[in-house]
Every structure is written in structure tokens, then in C-alpha cells.
Image: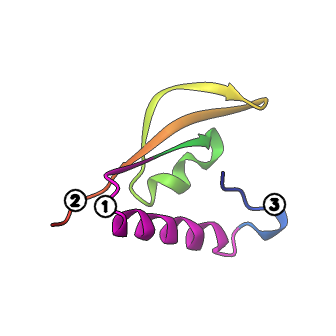
Amino acid sequence: RMAVLPQFRGKGIGKAILIKLIKLAQTQKISSLMLHSQALAIPFYEKYGFNPQGPIYEEAGIDHRNMILLLPISH
């Protein structure tokens, strides 16, 4: 799970964590990443290449949608 407390949002913390996670996945030759995004955070993840998948659903009382990022496979 990844979350940034409201008072720390907009400071690049989420971006830094997400970029580090994507780079780590690439070094481990992972082909895709999937996450449960809060509906309001979908545009944030889309900026980093994640695409919405499936319907919106409720999780912990908040609307969510699955997001997936396909990573290029390097040889």
C-alpha cells in the first residue's frame, strides 16, 4: 500500500515513491504493476503510465479502480 498523509501531499513524496517502485520492478524484470487507486488519484497514476482497468468499486468506504502499468521487458 502507498499513501501520503494529506498534509504532505503535493510535495513530490508520492511521485518519488512511485518512480522508485517502477525502477525497482524494472530491475527485477517484472512485466507489470497493478494497484488499487482511489478514484480521485487516478489522474496521478495515469501521469506515470498506469491505465484504468475494470469498474469502480468500493474499498474501505472509498471508490477505487484497478490500475495497471505494463513494463517493457529488456534483455
Spatial CA span between label 2 and label 3:
35 Å
Given residues 64 and 1, the one toward you in this image is 1
Q: Please tell me which of labels 2 and 1 falls first in the chain.
A: 1
Q: Which of marks 2 and 3 is in front?
A: 2
Badge 2 crowding class, 10 Å Cα cut-off, few under 14, some 14 to 19, many 20 or more, is few
Q: Examine the structure image and report whether residue 14 is included in the region drawn in magenta.
A: yes
- Most extreme residue toward the right is 7
| Secondary element at image label 1 | loop
Q: In which quarter of the image is residue 17?
A: bottom right
The residue labelled by disc 3 is: 6
| Secondary element at image label 3 | helix
The residue that appears at 51% across and 54% down in the rendered structure is: 45
Say which mark, if any, is on residue 29. 1
Badge 1 crowding class, 10 Å Cα cut-off, few under 14, some 14 to 19, many 20 or more, is some
Q: Examine the structure image and report whether residue 12 is included in the region drawn in magenta.
A: yes
Spatial CA span between label 1 and label 3:
33 Å
Q: Quadrant of residue 39?
A: top right
Can you say whether 17 is above or below 45 in the image? below
Residue 17 is left or right of residue 51, and the answer is right
Q: Please tell me which of labels 1 and 3 falls first in the chain.
A: 3
Can you say whether 54 is above or below 3 in the image? above
The residue that appears at 73% across and 66% down in the rendered structure is: 9
Residue 44 is left or right of residue 52, and the answer is right
Magenta-colored span? 10-33
Which image quarter is the C terminus in? bottom left
